Image: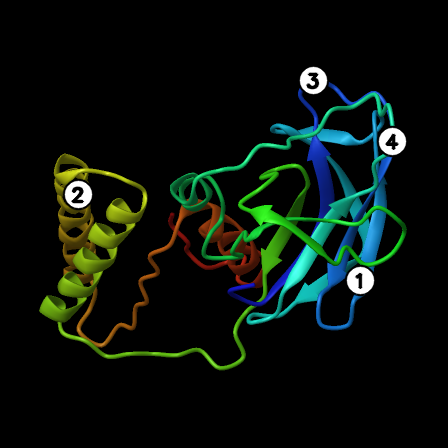
């Protein structure tokens, strides 16, 4: 895990629709024991490409720790599952990489902790989980100039494009979009009163949505824009 989060549901791919139920389990690698499990099947709620079952109690995952997510399978199972191997660039671009880092497949041919490593980036998306971010108890603030902020964002943007396999044209397109975003941010901040306080948060949309929902519930009379 890369950040603190709470897992609220476990899921299985639902295209084509599921034909039988299966147990999905979240494991702690450090303790080699299950943290939670639930049964996902034809009656589970489908959102996007997955069928989901909510957990009775959220499970807290900590950054720097490794966890494993498994599905109990059987011979002649009616539902098929992904046994493909993804490229690193696909994993980065098609997952919430800033939340968790997908390493690969694991398995076990009997009950118990899945202790056998089964290939880097193997079986991507065979199981899934929903999570909400936990607020940091000790936020880290770094004061930078406008030029330093622009340089850091440009460097990060170029690196993301490189990792995802994008060429120079993609890098230039991302930098142009970033320049427009920074210009918009500067215009918004310039309209504030001199003594007013403001905070800007740049993150992928899927990370901003739960933050925005939490802020809106905590400050119903405030103003929040995404």
Dot 2: element: helix
How far apart are the two marked residues, 4 and 2, measured between alpha carbons? 44 Å
Q: Earlier in the sequence, mark 4 or mark 2?
A: 4
Q: Is residue 124 left or right of residue 197?
A: right
Q: Residue at x 83, y 21 (%)?
A: 78
Residue 70 pos. (x, y %): 75, 47
For the rendered model, the colour scheme is: rainbow
Secondary structure under badge 3? Answer: loop
Which residue, given by chain and number where applicable, does mark 4 sit on? 21
Residue pointed to by mark 2: 171
Asked if residue 108 is positioned above or below residue 124 in the image, the reply reads below
Residue 122, which numbered label? Answer: none
The x and y percentages for residue 20 are 87, 25
Residue furthest to the top in view is: 16
Per the image, the residue denoted by label 3 is: 16
Q: Residue 121, position in %: x, y?
A: 53, 45
Kindly check if marks 4 and 3 are in contact, taking CB atoms under 8 A apart as contact: no
Image location (x, y in percent) of residue 75:
87, 29
Residue at 24% across, 38% down: 166
Closer to the chain start, of discs 3 and 2, is: 3
Q: 118 or 104: which is nearer to us?
A: 118
Circles 4 and 2, Cβ within 8 Å, touching? The answer is: no
Q: Is residue 78 above or below residue 141?
A: above
Q: Quadrant of the N terminus?
A: bottom right
């Amino acid at each position: 895990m890369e950040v603190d989060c709470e897992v609220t549901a476990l899921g299985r791919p639902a295209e084509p629709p599921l034909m039988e139920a299966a147990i999905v389990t979240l494991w702690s690698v450090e303790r080699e024991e299950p943290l939670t499990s639930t049964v996902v099947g034809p009656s589970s709620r489908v959102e996007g490409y997955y069928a989901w079952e909510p957990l009775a109690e959220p499970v807290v995952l900590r950054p720097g720790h490794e966890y494993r997510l498994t599905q109990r399978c059987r011979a002649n199972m009616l539902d098929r599952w992904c046994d493909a191997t993804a490229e690193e660039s696909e994993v980065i671009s098609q997952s919430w990489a800033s939340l968790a880092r997908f390493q690969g497949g694991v398995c076990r041919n009997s009950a118990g902790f899945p202790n056998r490593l089964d290939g880097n980036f193997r079986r991507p998306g065979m199981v899934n989980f929903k999570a909400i971010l936990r607020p940091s108890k000790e936020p880290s603030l770094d004061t930078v100039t406008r030029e330093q902020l622009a340089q850091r964002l440009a460097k990060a943007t170029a690196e993301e494009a490189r990792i995802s396999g994008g060429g120079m044209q993609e890098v230039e397109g991302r930098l142009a979009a970033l320049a427009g975003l920074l210009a918009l941010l500067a215009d918004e901040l310039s309209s504030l009163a001199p003594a007013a306080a403001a905070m800007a948060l740049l993150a992928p949309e899927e990370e901003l949505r739960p933050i925005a929902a939490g802020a809106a519930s905590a400050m119903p009379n405030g103003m929040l824009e995404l």
